[in-house]
Image (cartoon, grey):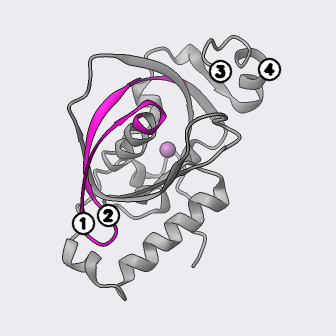
Amino acid sequence: MAVLKVAKLGNPVLRQVAEKVNLNELKDPKGELQNFIDDMIDTMREEGGVGLAAPQVNRSIQVVVLEYENNERYPGEPPIPVTVLVNPVLSEFNDEKVLGWESCLSLVDFRGLVPRFTSLMLNAYDRQGNKIEKRASGFEAVVLQHEIDHLNGKVFLDRMEDLTQLSYQEEFEEFWLKKDPAP
Ligand code: NI
């Protein structure tokens, strides 16, 4: 168990396409990958994130962890139990996008208004190598798009359509929070 160092924007690891995980390595219960996944969960919790992708802790492999319960940066969203996704793929996006404020541990203090699909299909493996297939919507769909973008070398800035809607946290609270129609 350890808290890992988070890679910040400018670190080339965030711009690489992450490698797929070998599922045989994953299935070894004493394998190094299981320790790494535990460390990712510890790091996400310690840093107060709702998700973390392996490239954000300097390892370019396709692993994402998620967990949400009343995070102060995203108040009032439905909880997401701790989830590990290996080699995740998103598909079957619906036509509708919504704008929502996002932040990222690799972008430290920035917040930006990002358009995201509201519904999609997730295919992945869990940490034991079991298949996951589910439809996700709402906040969970947003978090999935954000984290899986990291596996493709993308950060939320790349998805923004209007960079005037980029703000530091303090200014976000002062100038934007009250204007945001979505609570
Ligand atoms: Ni991020």
Name the magenta segment's main secondary structure.
strand
Q: Could you tell me which residue is drawn at 27 percent across and 17 percent down?
A: 95
Q: What's drawn in magenta, residue-wise?
A: 113-141
Task: Indicate the amino acid at tag 4.
Answer: Glu
Q: According to the image, label 1 marks what residue?
A: 130
Q: According to the image, label 4 marks what residue?
A: 174
Pointer 2 or 3: first along the chain: 2
For residue 124, side relative to residue 68 (left or right): left
Q: Where in the figure is residue 92, as x and y percent of width and height?
A: 20, 31
Q: According to the image, label 2 marks what residue?
A: 126
Q: Quadrant of the N terminus?
A: bottom right
Q: Could you tell me which residue is drawn at 63 percent across and 36 percent down?
A: 74
Look at the numbered disc 2 and give the secondary structure of its residue. loop
Task: Indicate the amino acid at tag 3.
Answer: Pro
Instruction: State the image quarter where residue 182 is shown.
Output: top right
Q: Which mark is residue 33?
A: none
